[in-house]
Image: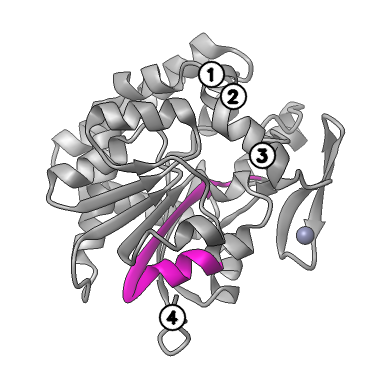
């Protein structure tokens, strides 16, 4: 598909999704995510997350609503894989969920502890999964694009879920139709490619297929705001942090106005409609383990 920073992005027939080659080793990733990621790659991430917390909490509240509406959840035990700064865990804890995060970044884990939420400071692997227990919900946001073997990760996650459990996966929606238009009509280079941090490039179809192949049934798909719509309207925020922040502010305002007007369900319907057209900056899928194929950990 493309070549960036010495990596090729391929449409891999055997994996069923796009990824870079060569695929970085687990050792290389350990280096990045334990120490460097939040200090070097995302130095403003924690600060901005705090600044945007009212807006994030609307999104979090919708996700927990979906978990709670999902019939058959026995209890409210949630695991957040790649829990980052810990705000998603805190939101759940405040509404009565028993939450646990697993997060390799030293800085992010320390931040989470300060919030008073429980976090295992590590990667999710066969070994670390042993001691975690079983969960009614596993949440995994902005994780699968970063890891070398997403299929193995999903198979592992399936064993951590109760038979009626729910998985919520969020990944960037890459090579989407708006990005295609920006490349073909407006001369954009593929700015969303970020190797070695982003190894895998999913869309609604490829992530759904991957989940099915790991024994999950997708029950709901939603998009997040198609932020690249600003580029199509002539606001080129690529490499322009101030303008990017401004566009992000407009997106927040759009969503918060709908929220305050009591139109949350209309907004979610709008995002489900975008998802059905393959649009949205991120793919958000809710899935259940297919019954009868559940393995015992
Ligand atoms: Zn492959």
Q: Earlier in the sequence, mark 2 or mark 3?
A: 3
- Which SS class for mark 2? helix
What span is colored magenta in the figure? Answer: 155-174
Q: Is residue 243 left or right of residue 137?
A: right
Local packing at callout 1 (Cα closer than 10 Å; few below 14, some 14-19, many 20+) is some
Which of the labelled discs sits on residue 296, or is there none? Answer: 4
Marks 1 and 4, how far apart at CA: 38 Å
Local packing at callout 2 (Cα closer than 10 Å; few below 14, some 14-19, many 20+) is some
- Which SS class for mark 4? loop
Q: Position of residue 291 (x, y in %)?
A: 40, 86
Marks 4 and 2, how far apart at CA: 36 Å
Q: Earlier in the sequence, mark 1 or mark 3?
A: 3
Q: Earlier in the sequence, mark 1 or mark 4?
A: 1
Residue linked to disc 3: 29
Q: Is mark 4 within 8 Å of ligand 1?
A: no
- Which SS class for mark 3? helix
Marks 1 and 3, how far apart at CA: 15 Å
Q: Earlier in the sequence, mark 4 or mark 3?
A: 3
**CB contact under 8 Å: marks 1 and 2:** yes
Q: Position of residue 121 (x, y in %)?
A: 44, 40
Marks 4 and 3, how far apart at CA: 29 Å
Please identify the dominant SS of the magenta region: strand
- The answer to whether residue 60 is visible is yes
**Residue at the extreme bottom:** 292
Assess whether residue 171 is covered by the magenta stretch. Answer: yes
Q: Is residue 170 above or below residue 252?
A: below
**CB contact under 8 Å: marks 1 and 4:** no
Assess whether residue 115 is covered by the magenta stretch. Answer: no
Which of the labelled discs sits on residue 39, or is there none? Answer: 1
């Amino acid at each position: 598909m493309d070549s960036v920073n010495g990596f090729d992005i391929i449409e891999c027939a055997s994996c069923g999704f796009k990824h870079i080659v060569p695929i970085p080793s687990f050792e290389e990733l350990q280096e990045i995510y334990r120490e460097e990621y939040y200090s070097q790659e995302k130095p403003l991430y924690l600060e901005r997350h705090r600044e945007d917390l009212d807006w994030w909490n609307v999104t979090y509240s919708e996700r927990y609503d979906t978990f709670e509406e999902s019939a058959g959840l026995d209890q409210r035990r949630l695991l957040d894989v790649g829990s980052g700064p810990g705000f998603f865990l805190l939101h759940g804890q405040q509404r009565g969920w028993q939450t646990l995060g697993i997060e390799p970044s030293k800085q992010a884990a320390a931040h989470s502890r300060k919030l008073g939420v429980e976090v295992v400071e590590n990667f999710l692997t066969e070994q670390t999964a042993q001691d975690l227990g079983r969960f009614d919900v596993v949440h995994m946001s902005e994780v699968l694009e970063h890891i070398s073997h997403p299929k193995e990760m999903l198979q592992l996650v399936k064993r951590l879920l109760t038979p009626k459990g729910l998985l919520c996966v969020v990944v960037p929606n890459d090579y989407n139709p708006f990005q295609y238009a920006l490349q073909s009509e407006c001369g954009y280079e593929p700015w969303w490619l970020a190797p070695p941090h982003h190894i895998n490039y999913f869309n609604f179809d490829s992530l759904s297929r991957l989940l099915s192949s790991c024994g999950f049934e997708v029950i709901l798909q939603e998009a997040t705001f198609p932020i690249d719509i600003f580029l199509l309207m002539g606001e080129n925020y690529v490499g322009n942090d101030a303008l990017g922040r401004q566009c992000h502010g407009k997106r927040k305002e759009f969503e918060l106005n709908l929220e305050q007007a009591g139109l949350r369900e209309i907004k979610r319907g709008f995002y489900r409609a975008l998802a059905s057209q393959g649009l949205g900056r991120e793919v958000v899928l809710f899935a259940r383990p297919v019954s009868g194929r559940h393995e015992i950990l």
